[in-house]
Amino acid sequence: MNTTTLIKIFGFTFILLLLGSCSKDAPEQQKEYVRNGNNVDVRIPANISSLNPATALDAYTLMVIRSIHQYLATYDLETAQMVPVLLKELASVDTTDGRTIYQMEIKEGANWDDGSPITAKDVETSLKMLFNPKGKPSPYRSYLATIDLFEIDPDNPKKFSVGISQQYVLAEEAIYSIMPVLQASKYDPDNQYANYSLIDLITNTGIDDSDEVLQALAATFESEAFSVEPAGVNGSGPYEVVEWKTGELMVLAKKTDWWGETDSPSNTWFKANPDTIRLISVTDATTAAQMFTNNSFDVAITLDSKDFKTLAENPTYTDEYNFISDVTNIQYLVYQNTKSPVLQDKRVRMGISMLFDYTSIIENIFDGLGNRTNSPVLNFKSYYAEDLPLIDFDIEGAIAQFNEAGWIDNNKDGVLEKEIDGVLTDFKLEYLVTPTPAAENIALIFQAAAKDAGVEVEIITKDRQGWYEMVGQRDFDLTMTGSGFSPGLDDFRQMFHTSANIPTGQNRMQFGNAETDALLDAIAANLDEISREEQFRTFQEILYDEQAVTWLMTPLSRVVIHDRFEHGGSNLSPNVCLGCLTLK
Amino acid sequence: MSKSIGIRILLFIPTLFVLSICLFGLQESARGDQVASLCGIDGTVDERVYLDCIKTYNLDQAAFYISVSPQFVDAEVLRTIFPAGKKQTIEQLAYQTGDWDGTIHWMQLMDELIERDYSLQAELQVQINALRSKYWSGLSLVGFQNQLEQINHPEVDVLISQIQNLSTELTQSSPSFSDYLPQIDWNGSANRFHHWWSKAIVFEFGQSYSGRSVNALIKGAILRTLLLNLIAFTLAILLACSLVIWSSRKLNEQSRHPLDGWSSIFLAIPRFWLATVLIFLFANQARFAALGFFDIGAFTLTSSGISLIGLIKVYTLPIICLAFPITWSIYKHLRDKIKAEWKMPYVQSARAKGIPESKIIRQYVLPNSINPLLTIVGSLISRLLAGSIIIESIFAIPGLGGLLFDAFLSNDWPVLYALCFIAGVMTLSGYLLSDILYFIFDPKLRKGGMKYV
């Protein structure tokens, strides 16, 4: 075989590959594509890999699940108020001796796509699927594990009661919106879940280890047919998945004759304006910005902040697009390890908070796309403590705080020192970061300011897993992270209660004492809105005084929407209500 | 020839087995709690959920067919201790003291202490919570002693003093030499490697942390990567051979051609930079409307219907990026070899006969210089994934490279190891193919068999 033959072989292969890649389906695909009209092309910065509602965690997967399924009730995207979706109205609540019963009724007219009514049995079966002990353990189970009663009204299959064994402020929200209602006859056509009580499944009592029926039911629920295949993933929501190429494209089409079309026009969960929503996965930020300039999208979610800012200042794009920066439910914060020998004094922690140049961080690192905050409560909530002053960048003020706490540079070496347990200790801090540009730059800005204040800061960079390990062992003085907070009611026990001070718990600051624990427990059990809000404010004051957390900023959303659509905004991550987009 | 190839294929199997052991070892030693990742749960869930997960994914079984552990550790019990941090504490304590029964007794007392209901004693509850934090973080016994001393409450005094006494007893004991003699257990097929290997060998890679089957993810991505790389590779060979023939036209007059110098510079250009420049120039309709012919993102094919023009628009730039360094790598190797061949007597003889130089190169020199190309054919298959990682991410093409990149960012080990396993199989196949090609193209090897390879 000589070179000429070799070249011929390669040439032939090349042509064959080119020709072979031309699909025979081309004409059919061509028909489906309509770039304009009442269709929306949306860039999402993530790959959706499964639509199983029991295991879905990220904002983009949940965005799709909320479009194809429905919950009993959930937070309105525009008002952030709890609104009924499948329920006729929000539950009537009866609390006796610390036990709470919620009575609910599903709307008349709420139907599945095959025309059969949505009933309480569907709700019960959905919960049974969530709690099937033979299934993959869902992270959502713990929110509903206190259910000790589920009763369907014998006279009205749409009416049911749910009992909770303790008084808990988020129990109602969890019942409404943790699990969407799934069609029982679709997942369990032989009605086999009827042989198991929900409470037995929750408590795993009387369930045989080798129960093959439950194993088969769990396998069905988790199968790709019901979590990936377009035909199987759809529910009672306004849209259905009609095409899905993993890592590339998902097409949601509006259902014809959907039951909720005229049900509640003001409720954002009943808005389904675009005929087709195409979710395009582009994970690389530069590529996304480039594609945006090529007019590849109608909606671009979470563009890189620099690209967003540059494009928003360019008249070529501002003429055609609306650049929306809404408040998000994310906060960037710095944990201060309150048990670290150098950070045990709250005056020191206050001094540390004064060494962050907030304005510079927001302007230079986040391109101005962020708001200051002073508490874990999102600032649009009624119980946000707006009276608490924002902490300013103030090196002199920080030095004064340190001096007051006994840290003084007596030996004039530029580093403050103090005697701790009989040992003269230099003021040195370990600042743990993950290798992201924002985290590293914030640490560098802080390090420079701290040096001026006589504090030596060592920046330790660890990958995500290493960060979790060190933070789990509380092996740090300071560390930055981003954290998502609920748009609804807060249960801060998950972050500030001493019981959350476990390696995987959120109380990474090791904050808390009997007083704060009692206050948090009281808030969680208080169903009276007025006194609860007062308790929330008190807690924010304590937190402010203690400075276990330095609240850096709340980033603003970076959503771009084509001018041919009107959009009302959304408080729920990822800050866009796709069904609400109205063609002008 | 068939015997030699047969031997190669037979060697393929043990090599793959060793590769699997290495990969599995890596997977096992990966940091983080596998249970938490596989089931999407954290240490705040109750023990039952955690143990369910352990059972579902065979994490209660030994890692390999043979397990080696010190006499003082019951590995089976250790594997089911919840949560991961507490397991670490117990393991450390057992290694420190060499007293497994004492360690377990200590754990039971500690569990009793932290699990009691202290709802009516708020201060005590806070102290117990702090203790639990240490207990679940893998703290040493000395650390607990300090923590325990701080708790002073009549309700737990007896229990605390029991724990302290036992702790003192344990700190005084240490493993003897005989305790360290390994206890070797045969676990039969009830081990995690067996489950993994028996599936991996038939390309069944289980479930990704995202909940999808790894096979489904790979199936959706592999065709694009193959298409991209095969076209890029073919193009690179054609281009490199053409450039070599062209630059060697006047080899007799000038032994160096300007392309020789440029090839080193071109070879040093990073793919991601080239990709960014190409996108900026040729896929930017807003800035350069005349040049911006190309598209980014495989989704545009789905949108506009798969056609030859569509394919060219989407795949041309990534193919150029992939082909560019390969072209110059082949060029350099071929060019060096051709220069060496040019001095051979048979070339001088051909030139003396008046055969044109371009013909000498095409018909005589190039076939004799083909060896570097064959080497690259073998190694390139193993580089398919590596080359695609950045390019597929930049051009939004959901292929294997993009999948690997995403899996790496999200620590999705099942996907990572499946792709590494596939890359390993591809590498071995590449070298096998390379050997076969050597055999076909090199008459010396054909005569002498493959033992020279």
Image (cartoon, coloured by chain):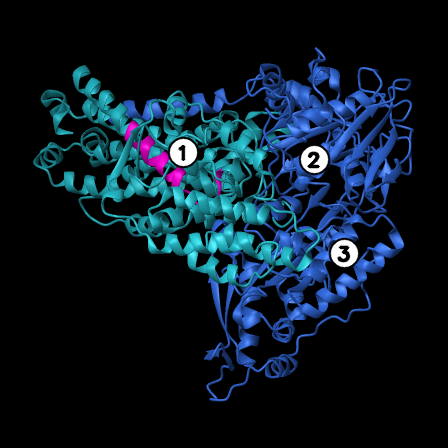
Q: Amino acid at mark 3?
A: Leu
Q: Which residue is mark 3?
A: A378
Q: Which residue is mark 2?
A: A145
Residue at image position (62%, 52%) is: A500
Q: Quadrant of the N terminus of chain A?
A: top left
Q: Is residue A467 visible?
A: no
Q: Which residue is mark 1?
A: B76
Tag 2 subunit? A
Magenta portion: prevailing SS class = helix
Residue extending farthest to the top is A190
Q: Quadrant of the C terminus of chain A?
A: top right
Q: Which mark is in front, 1 or 3?
A: 1
Q: Are marks 2 and 1 on the same chain?
A: no
**Where residue B190 sits in the image (x, y, percent)?**
38, 24
- Rendered hue of chain B is cyan
Which numbered disc covers residue A561? Answer: none
Q: Bounds of the magenta span?
A: B17-34
Left or right, A239 with respect to B428, comes to right
